[in-house]
Amino acid sequence: MKLNKKEILEYQQNRPPYLMIDFAEEVIPGKSAKGYKDLNDDEWFFKVHWEGDPNMPGMLQIESLVQMCALSILTLPGNKGKAVYLTSANSMKFIKKIVPNCRLYIETKIKSFKRGVAICEGLGLVNKGIVCKAEFNLILPDEL
């Protein structure tokens, strides 16, 4: 399954400027999601983080991973448009700065999804090099 920005907005509740994904190239419901965010120099966070050295804040990098992975849950039958919450993030690594005018590729997978709790992992890549990664847990409150 592929989702453009308009279709992503049908599945999940984040809205610009907090939408941290632009396109899902491959979504396998209940399993994985891959896609990207194009980071233009006019992104709101580049204006404030940091003057003279704009870069994507680490927690927004994690949010990009979370939003992409959430599509794996929200594309399961009956979940379209529901809320998905991040409950924890572990083993976060920020390897290289993410700067304006690049494409952040995002690869995520669900390692386990039982009773509304998902154990997940994600990678962020720029120019085929890993720039960030994390393990995190998501919940689908409707299933708890």
Image: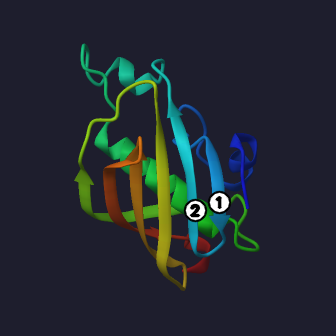
The quadrant where residue 36 appears: top right
* Between 108 and 85, the one nearer to me in the picture: 108
Q: Can the viewer see residue 128 in this picture? A: yes
The answer to the question of whether label 1 and label 2 lie on touching residues, with beta carbons closer than 8 A, is yes
In the image, is 106 to the left or to the right of 135?
right
Residue with the mark numbered 2: 33
Residue 26's disc is 1
Q: How many marks?
A: 2
The furthest residue to the top: 52
In the image, is 133 to the left or to the right of 23?
left
- The quarter of the picture where the N terminus appears is bottom right
**Which residue is pictured at 54% across the width and 31% down the height?**
17
Please state the horizontal and vertical placement of residue 15, each as a whole percent of the image. Answer: 61, 39
The quadrant where residue 23 appears: top right
Colour mode of the rendering: rainbow
Residue 43's disc is none
**Which residue is pictured at 55% across the width and 71% down the height?**
141
**Which residue is pictured at 51% across the width and 41% down the height?**
20
Look at label 2 and name its amino acid: Ala
Q: Is residue 89 above or below residue 4?
A: below
Please state the horizontal and vertical placement of residue 77, each as a whole percent of the image. Answer: 76, 74
Q: Can the viewer see residue 18 in this picture? A: no
* Between 23 and 136, the one nearer to me in the picture: 23
Look at label 1 and name its amino acid: Glu
- The quarter of the picture where the C terminus appears is bottom right
* Between 76 and 1, the one nearer to me in the picture: 1
**Which residue is pictured at 59% across the width and 33% down the height?**
16
Q: Residues within 10 Å of mark 1 (few under 14, many from 20)?
A: some
Give me the C-alpha separation between circle 1 and circle 2. Answer: 6 Å
Secondary structure at numbered mark 1: strand
Please state the horizontal and vertical placement of residue 64, each as a whole percent of the image. Answer: 46, 48
